[in-house]
Structures are given as C-alpha cells and as structure tokens.
Amino acid sequence: MDFLQNERRVYERRQIEETPYLQKTVSRRAESKKKITRTEKDQLKEKWKREGRKEFKIACHNINGLKTKGWKLGNLIEWAESEEITILGITETNMSEREGKFLAHGLNIRYKGYWTSAAQDKKKGSGIGILIEEKWEKHVGAVKRYSEYVIEVRMYFKQLELVLLGVYIPPNDKTISKKVQQRIVETVANRKKQTQIIVFGDFNHTVDNVLDRQHSQTTNYKRLPLFN
C-alpha cells in the first residue's frame, strides 16, 4: 500500500510539473499554425496583385430583339467591356444562331459568342446568347442548345467543372415554362461533386417579392415552382 501511495504522489507531482510545459507547447503550436495561415494568405494576396485575381463577373440582359437592331449589341458590349464583365447572357435575341455569330463577328469584340436560334414560328420571345471573354474561351469544353429557350456551356478547370445555363421563360406559355424548369432541375440533380452550376436569364417571374418589386405585392403574387 505504501508503495502504491508513493507512486501516486510521484505521478501527481510529475503532472503538476509537466502541465505548464504541455500548455506552453500547445500554445506555441497554435501560434505557429496562425503564422503559417497568415503567411499563406499574404502570399495569395501578393500573387493576386502580381498576376491579377482570377474572378468572374457575370451579367445578363434581355435585349428585346437584335435582328434589325444590331447597334444594341454594340452598346451592350461596350458597357460589358467597361465593367470588365467575363460572361454576358443575352435573352430574347429574336434571331438565328447564324445571325448571332455574324453580328458578333462584325463588331470585332473580345468575346466569343454561343447562340441558340429563335423559334421560327414566333416574331419575338425566344433566342439566347452567352458571350464569354476570349481569354476564357480555352476552358469551354461543350455547348448544348436544348431549345430556343435553353443553352448550356460547360467550362473545365482544374478540379472544377463550371456549367453556365442560360434560359428564357416566355411569360404566357406554361408548356415551355415547365420544360425549361425541368431542364434546370435535371442539370442540378445530375451534377457531379466537382461541378458548380450558374443559372441566369429572364424567368418572367418574381423570385423575391421584396427585392424584385418597387412595391411589394401581398395579393396576386405567384412564385415560379422552380423557386419554391
């Protein structure tokens, strides 16, 4: 019994003596980790200053027809360039894919355009374009034109697949509206782990009753099922 009591006293004394050391060791390690983290952040900031921070600025505009008003695209591009927009979505072009390519080429812009054709049986209310800054064009791996109302551009980076989904939902066509929403849901549901999806366009619906209206509606306000 005396032996066990002596051993216990020795153990407790050692614990008292070692505890401050252990605390100091843990504290030093924590401080060292903070210094490393700060150093990494500083290095990243310096790299951004040196090479330029790689970020996307995305905008979308309903241009309400380009077929006979090509000057509107020129004005929009001029604004996009001044704002350093990387990706520009254009809805309701009301022209064919070929006409879109020809119009963009004639303006001699620094964007690469991807277009869908407008519906041939409609004078207005269809056709989408996605313009991507030329320096990012090399990352474009696939383009799918699902209809006159949906276009998809896939961009590939290291450990990242970026899906750009440009859409236009006509205000008075429930059938097309349903199909466009289904396409969005399917794209999101089937995405891979390393995939990020950006959906932009003209939904012709109120997403947020407070943010999207000058005067909020309390009655006759119906959300698009996609946003419920």
Image (cartoon, rainbow, N blue to C red):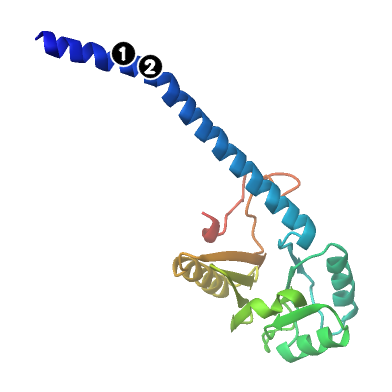
At 65% across and 45% down in the image, what residue appears?
Answer: 39
Q: Position of residue 187 (x, y in %)?
A: 50, 70
Above/below status of 211 relative to 182: above
The kind of residue on which mark 1 rests is: Arg
Classify residue 158 as left or right of residue 101.
left
Q: Nearer the viewer, residue 158 or 116?
A: 158
Say how many tags the image has: 2
The kind of residue on which mark 2 rests is: Glu
At 78% across and 65% down in the image, what residue appears?
Answer: 85
Residue 13, numbered label: 1
Q: Position of residue 174 (x, y in %)?
A: 56, 70
Above/below status of 19 relative to 48: above
Q: Which residue lies under the disc numbered 2?
A: 17
Residue found at the very far top of the displayed protein? 2
Residue 79 occupies quadrant:
bottom right
Residue 74 occupies quadrant:
bottom right
